[in-house]
């Protein structure tokens, strides 16, 4: 992350005065557009592991100053082959279909990358230049995320967004993801393989439509006992409803851990 982007991230420790009741974390997006990288993947897909590794190794694939928000959204439409993906959610398949429609495609498949709402077919070699181009654009929205983990194991989340005047109708989304996951697959196309995953979306909030250019989300999210809190991360983004373009995105890993 470059110096200007780093200065926009404000982590408030519990030793400081609370901000609106949130003592642990207060993060704001920067002046340039971050790149939202969505990978649609499945443990039942034999061609997905290389894409999963690409997402895990994103820092090595991008320039040092790149600002990117990676999310892995597991889909379940390959479960019938013989292996049920434990991280799949029906909402992710629906979102993928919606993004494909916006990109004027009638097909969905895995692995499939979307970067700021646009399909990226040549992800093996195209991510670096695509992210650089997106980061060069001024952001058209601002995002703020505040959060704290209560002793009960609940994540208290407050996210808000504002879009520039004249922007298309847009919505705010928030995702809670986990890294460091692995599965030993015993059936289907990847039978016998142990698969590793990072940035796997566990909870998805949205779309929350912006009204008069602003939106707010306030939630109490239970954290499952099986989740590793030190590997959780929050992400938020604002996306145009008509074009699918992402006006701004934010990654706040320090907002989800214990």
Image (cartoon, grey):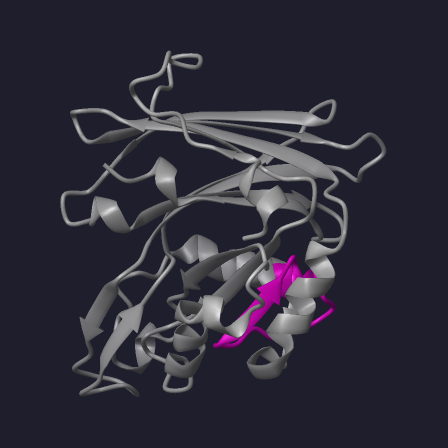
Give me the residue at 14% from left, 43% from top. 225
> x and y percent of residue 243 in the render?
76, 53
Residue stretch rendered in magenta on the structure: 99-118
Would you say residue 104 sits in the magenta stretch? yes
Q: Position of residue 191 (x, y in %)?
A: 22, 87
Quadrant location of residue 26?
top left
Membership of 41 in magenta stretch: no
Establish if 217 lies above or below 189: above
Label tally:
0
Residue drawn at x 38%, y 19% as measured from the top left: 22
Up/down of 19 relative to 250, above or below: above
Residue nearer the viewer, 249 or 6: 6
Above or below for 170 versus 18: below
Residue 123 percent across, percent down from the top left: 58, 78
Residue 73 appearing in the image: yes
* The one of 157 and 97 positioned closer to us in this rendering: 157
* Residue found at the far right of this picture: 166
Give how far across and how far down residue 19 sits, in percent: 43, 15
Would residue 50 appear left or right of 30 to someone viewing this image?
Answer: left
Residue lying at 38% horizontally and 45% vertically, measured from the top left: 253
Q: Quadrant of residue 203?
A: top left
Residue beneath the point at 57% across and 36% down: 8
User: Given the current orientation, which residue lies at the most extreme front position?
Assistant: 3
Can you see residue 120?
no
Quadrant of the drawing holding the C terminus: top left
């Amino acid at each position: 992350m470059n110096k200007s982007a780093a200065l926009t991230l404000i982590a408030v420790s519990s030793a400081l005065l609370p901000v609106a009741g949130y003592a642990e974390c207060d993060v704001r997006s920067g002046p340039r557009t971050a790149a939202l990288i969505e990978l649609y993947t499945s443990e039942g897909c034999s061609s997905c592991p290389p894409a999963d590794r690409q997402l895990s190794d994103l820092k090595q694939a991008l320039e040092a100053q790149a600002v990117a928000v990676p999310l892995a959204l597991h889909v379940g439409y390959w479960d019938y082959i013989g292996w049920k993906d434990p991280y799949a959610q029906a909402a992710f398949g629906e979102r993928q279909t919606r993004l494909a429609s916006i990109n004027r495609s009638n097909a969905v498949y895995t692995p499939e990358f979307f970067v700021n709402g646009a399909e990226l077919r040549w992800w093996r070699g195209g991510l670096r230049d695509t992210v650089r181009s997106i980061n060069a654009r001024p952001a058209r929205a601002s995002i703020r995320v505040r959060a704290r983990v209560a002793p009960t194991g609940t994540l208290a989340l407050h996210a808000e967004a504002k879009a520039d005047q004249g922007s298309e109708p847009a919505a705010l989304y928030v995702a809670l993801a986990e890294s460091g996951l692995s599965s030993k697959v015993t059936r289907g196309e990847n039978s016998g393989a142990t698969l590793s995953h990072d940035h796997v979306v566990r909870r998805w909030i949205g779309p929350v439509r912006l009204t008069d250019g602003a939106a707010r989300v306030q939630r109490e999210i239970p954290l499952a006992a099986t989740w590793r809190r030190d590997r959780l991360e929050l992400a938020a983004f604002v996306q145009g409803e008509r074009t699918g373009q992402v006006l701004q995105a934010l990654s706040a890993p320090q907002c989800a851990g214990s």
